[in-house]
Amino acid sequence: MRARHCKRMMNTLVVLMIAQILVPGLSAQTPKLEQIHVLTLVGRPLPVIVGEKRGTFAKFGIEVVTENFASSDLVRAALAAGKGDLAYTAVDNAVAMVEVSGVDVVIVSGGEGSQNELIAQPDIKSIKELQGKTVLVDAVNTAYALQLKKILLLSGMQSGRDYEMKAFGATPLRLEALLKHKEFAGSMLGAPASISAKNAGLVSLGSVPDLLGAYQAGGHFARRKWADDHRESVVKYLAAYIESQRWVMDPANKKRVVEIMIEEYKLAPEVASVTYELSTTRPGGFEKDAQLDQEGFKNVLKLRAEVEGQWGGHVPSAKNYYDDTYYHAALAKVIAAK
């Protein structure tokens, strides 16, 4: 009995040895993925969703954990407190963290431009008719609030004098408030919220590309020290993000991307389809390879200087806030991976 048992053990060992020879790496453990905690404002970015589903982040050794917040104020506070690694939202928030809050953060990539529209109640037919009314913003001194201030300033109106600006949080919350409360006259909304708003009877008084030109909206930023200390991690994350955004923007994948948008964002099929078309074919949509639009970022800084009086009205260098070495290293990694 003992002899037969020993023989069976030997046969098992021989089989395992042969399997390891024929299938290299069979006995190796699956490499542990490095976790990157990303703070967001309106849900998981589409390239993150796609990258997870297709295994792109795992390919680069990254696992993404996202945390969504109801306002950009909360995103900035969480990042400043070290409760996340990267933030993905309008990059003017990074500029505000540096200049208003004194937190040393750095922008490491772009992602999207701005297709925001000034959406208003059905009875408002012109921008001038917003005078004396209340408009909604995420936060009163960052990003899309500055877009709104500039648009109204072009019609001779100033916040606090000619209209009231009320902080109300992220885009879905503002859309819901506009639909439920007629006393809120308007807000800046981007797709898909702008599409849903118009389908519900609200009106568009103009878009950012038409009224203000190029504007760098969504991008990644981090506390500068964390980014310096985790440079390779940032590069690997951005490489996966770039590859995923390429896949999203490839027309051959349109049908699958729209299906993912319907599933993940709970969108009506027609809203998802229009949002995809806008995001991939029109100015202000997804940026090629998630790069930062230099002209769009100059406009971000210009609006802050003009509307908020930052820097004495003089526009600073983009290099004060954007370190392109992370992005270019990530792009090189994507090319090498091909």
Image (cartoon, rainbow, N blue to C red):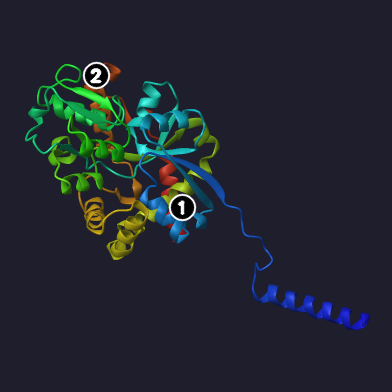
Q: Nearer the viewer, residue 158 or 200?
A: 200
| Quadrant where the image shows the N terminus | bottom right
List the single residue furthest toward the right. 2
Where residue 287 is drawn, which disc sits there? none
Q: Earlier in the sequence, mark 1 or mark 2?
A: 2
Q: Residue at x 44, y 30 (%)?
A: 105
Circle 2 sits in a helix, a strand or a loop, which is it?
Answer: helix
Residue placed most toward the observer, 2 or 219: 2
Q: Is residue 24 above or below residue 188?
A: below
Q: Are marks 1 and 2 in contact (CB under 8 Å)?
A: no
Where is residue 72? Give x, y as percent. Answer: 36, 32
- Identify residue for label 2: 313
**Residue located at (35% from left, 31% from top):** 93
Q: Depth check: 69 or 253 in front?
A: 69
Kindly identify the amino acid type of the residue bearing the numbered disc 1.
Lys
Quadrant for residue 182, please give it: top left
- Is the residue 75 above or below the residue 201 in the image? above
Say which element carries label 1. helix
Q: Which residue is mark 1?
A: 333
